[in-house]
């Protein structure tokens, strides 16, 4: 029913209107390795804009993702909760993420409040550009698309981007369009709020397209701020989530950016990303927002090694002073070794974060949610559990201690590792490598190279990651323990004989703290896998009733997956990106605006929800 689908706003939520309420900007990269930016040591790319951003704030060398793969990591960022709570998790390869744009699952706003919805309660304007990958619609086969899990349903006033992901089917043709693979148009498309405006996706221009939307959002916020100040009022704060496709495969750049870096096609992707960051930073300064904006930059998870050396990032560790290569973080995307979860991280907060600092204190992407809420004066109360921690004490330099006593690492439904005190990492299980194809060092190392046979049904090939089932793991009794201060490469498991004298606790005490936290979480939050190994968010099968298509088109079933058709046999395509995405529910629309009217249906149902998202062109 409609009532049960209303966006959740906890009754215990309170807002302190005297709080600083800075603007908040989150820049999220996709599949970037720890050392893929020049400021984190890469010798093969030039990233001056991210480097300038890091010099304005703090660079974090132990920034940890809540998951080693897209959907669960992004769910944790949005909610501040471990993915096991949201069901955006799975135990088998095809169900560790939302598998298609027409699947029935997603991050449920009636059960989990997003960072956008929370900040709206403190009066923030909200917007988003780019990749979502947390579901779109949940309607049945004979019902209209309900966009239940779409960004607009999670409190984002304005959205322009790809609500699915950059999948193998998005490989672009010589014209830069995602139609090289026959199924590309069904998987790869652009929506303006809830309306498909570009199908198939012009992948070559995706970064410039979503950057333009971010710049438009900032320009409109600046105009509204100027008008507010003219009235003697305080300008409305804003939150924007910039979610890139870069550097996920298939790799792409605008043709003018190809061959520019020393890092090949992958390096070109990184440098195009840096250009976008530079444009957004210039806009912040131009509009006077640079002095009052809390900025986070990180990646969702580690590099997709199985894609091959030329198409994946790196997890190298360089000496901070000399730049000398010290080694390589173990593993990559899909694994809970450091290569899969230790991300580049930068935080800028003028007046709070000392410029030009570097911190090895353990923080997490999951901490963005509570940190932003605390800055905005939002408290949720004890009835709404959040697993992230406010990192403000670390940002202010008040402490070098992690705000997480124990941080849990999930692979699928199982807790297989934990960090204690931000220093010691306990492994109850570690992934087996080369469980698919035999080791081939020309493709990757410390990985599980192979091709997902089921992916060929889409007309493309997806590479396999290391798995999360018991057969994919080596179990350790007693558990392995590594020192993340002295051994971030995870080469030397500690023993009583090698236990550091400055640990502040014994080896057995550290293991006991980890075990207690693991058992407590398992007792409180039970996974709800289906027979296919999916969580509630990643379960189900695709349906033409949920397939997004251009206005005037309809979905049909092509082989297994839906496709979009115009009329009986006509190909469906559109390229109609609006010049303005307006959040006012009172704006008049005409011309193309009428064709986009379905994007407003049901937006903002429920107490505390955003105003209806209306497209104005």
Image: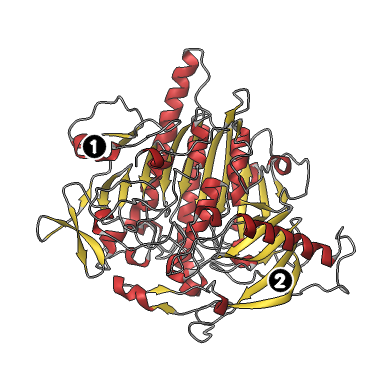
Tell me which residue sits at (24%, 55%) in the image: 545
Q: Position of residue 443 (x, y in %)?
A: 50, 79
Q: Are marks 1 and 2 in contact (CB under 8 Å)?
A: no
Query: Which comes before the other along the chain, label 1 or label 2?
Result: 2
Q: Nearer the viewer, residue 354 or 198?
A: 198
User: Quick one: label 2, few (<14), some, or many (20+) residues within 10 Å?
Assistant: some
Whether residue 585 is visible:
yes
Q: Nearer the viewer, residue 216 or 74?
A: 74
Which type of secondary structure does the marked residue at label 1 adopt? helix
Q: Residue furthest top?
A: 231
Question: Which residue is labeled 1 in the image?
Answer: 597
Residue 15 shown left or right of residue 287 in the figure: right
Question: Which residue is labeled 2 in the image?
Answer: 490
Q: Position of residue 457 (x, y in %)?
A: 30, 73
28 over 558 or under it: above or below? above
User: Quick one: label 1, few (<14), some, or many (20+) residues within 10 Å?
Assistant: some
491 over 593 or under it: above or below? below
Question: Considering the image in quadrants, where does the N terminus appear?
Answer: top left
Whether residue 30 is visible:
no
295 over 142 or under it: above or below? above
Tell me which residue sits at (63%, 49%) in the image: 387
């Amino acid at each position: 029913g409609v009532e049960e689908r209303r966006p959740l706003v906890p009754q215990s939520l309170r807002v302190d209107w005297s709080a600083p309420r800075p603007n908040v900007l989150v820049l999220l990269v996709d599949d970037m390795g720890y050392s893929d930016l020049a400021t984190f040591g890469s010798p093969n790319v030039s990233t001056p804009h991210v480097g300038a951003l890091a010099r304005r704030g703090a660079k974090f060398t132990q920034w940890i993702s809540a998951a080693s793969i897209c959907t669960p990591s992004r769910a944790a960022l949005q909610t501040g909760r471990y993915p096991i709570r949201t069901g955006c998790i799975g135990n088998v390869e095809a169900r560790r993420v939302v598998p298609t744009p027409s699947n029935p699952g997603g991050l449920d706003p009636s059960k989990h409040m997003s960072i956008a919805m929370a900040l709206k309660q403190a009066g923030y304007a909200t917007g988003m550009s780019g990749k979502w990958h947390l579901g779109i619609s949940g309607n049945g086969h004979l019902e209209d698309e309900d966009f239940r899990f779409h960004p607009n349903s999670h409190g984002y006033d304005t959205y322009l981007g790809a609500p699915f992901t950059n999948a193998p089917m998005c490989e672009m043709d010589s014209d830069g369009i995602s139609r090289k693979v026959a199924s590309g148009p069904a998987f790869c498309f652009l929506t303006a709020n809830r309306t498909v405006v570009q199908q198939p996706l012009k992948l070559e221009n995706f970064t410039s397209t979503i950057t333009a939307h971010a710049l438009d959002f900032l320009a409109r916020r600046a105009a509204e701020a100027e008008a507010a100040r003219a009235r003697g009022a305080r300008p409305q704060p804003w939150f924007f989530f910039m979610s890139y496709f870069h550097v996920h495969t298939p790799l792409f750049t605008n043709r003018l950016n190809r061959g520019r870096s020393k890092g090949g096609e992958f390096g070109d992707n990184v440098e195009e990303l840096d250009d976008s960051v530079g444009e957004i930073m210039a806009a912040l300064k131009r509009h006077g927002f640079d002095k009052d904006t809390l900025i986070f930059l990180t990646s969702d998870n580690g590099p997709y090694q199985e894609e091959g050396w030329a198409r994946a990032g790196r997890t190298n560790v360089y000496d901070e002073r000399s730049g000398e290569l010290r080694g390589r973080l173990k593993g990559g995307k899909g694994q809970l070794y450091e290569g899969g979860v230790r991300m580049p991280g930068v935080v800028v907060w003028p007046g709070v974060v000392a410029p030009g600092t570097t911190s090895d204190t353990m923080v997490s992407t999951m901490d963005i949610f509570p940190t932003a809420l605390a800055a905005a004066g939002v408290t949720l109360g004890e009835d709404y559990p959040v697993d992230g921690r406010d990192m403000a004490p670390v940002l202010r330099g008040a402490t070098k201690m992690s705000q997480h006593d124990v941080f849990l690492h999930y692979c699928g439904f199982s807790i297989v590792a934990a960090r204690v005190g931000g220093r010691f990492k306990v492994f109850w299980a570690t992934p087996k490598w080369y469980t698919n194809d035999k080791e081939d060092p020309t493709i990757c190392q410390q990985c599980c190279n192979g091709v997902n046979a089921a992916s060929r049904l889409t007309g493309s090939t997806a590479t396999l990651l290391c798995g999360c089932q018991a057969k994919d793991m080596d179990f350790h009794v007693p558990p392995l323990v590594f020192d993340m201060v002295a051994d971030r490469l995870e080469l030397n498991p500690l023993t009583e004989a090698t236990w550091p004298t400055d640990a502040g606790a014994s080896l057995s005490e550290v293991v006991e703290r980890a075990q207690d936290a693991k058992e407590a979480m398992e007792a409180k939050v039970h996974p709800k896998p289906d027979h296919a190994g999916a969580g509630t968010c990643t379960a189900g099968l695709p349906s033409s009733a949920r397939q997004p298509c251009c206005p005037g088109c309809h979905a049909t079933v092509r082989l297994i997956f839906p496709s979009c058709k115009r009329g009986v046999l006509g190909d469906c395509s559109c390229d109609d990106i609006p010049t303005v995405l307006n959040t006012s529910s009172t704006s008049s629309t005409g011309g193309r605006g009428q064709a986009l009217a379905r994007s407003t249906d049901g937006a903002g149902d429920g107490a505390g929800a955003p105003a209806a998202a209306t497209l104005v062109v």
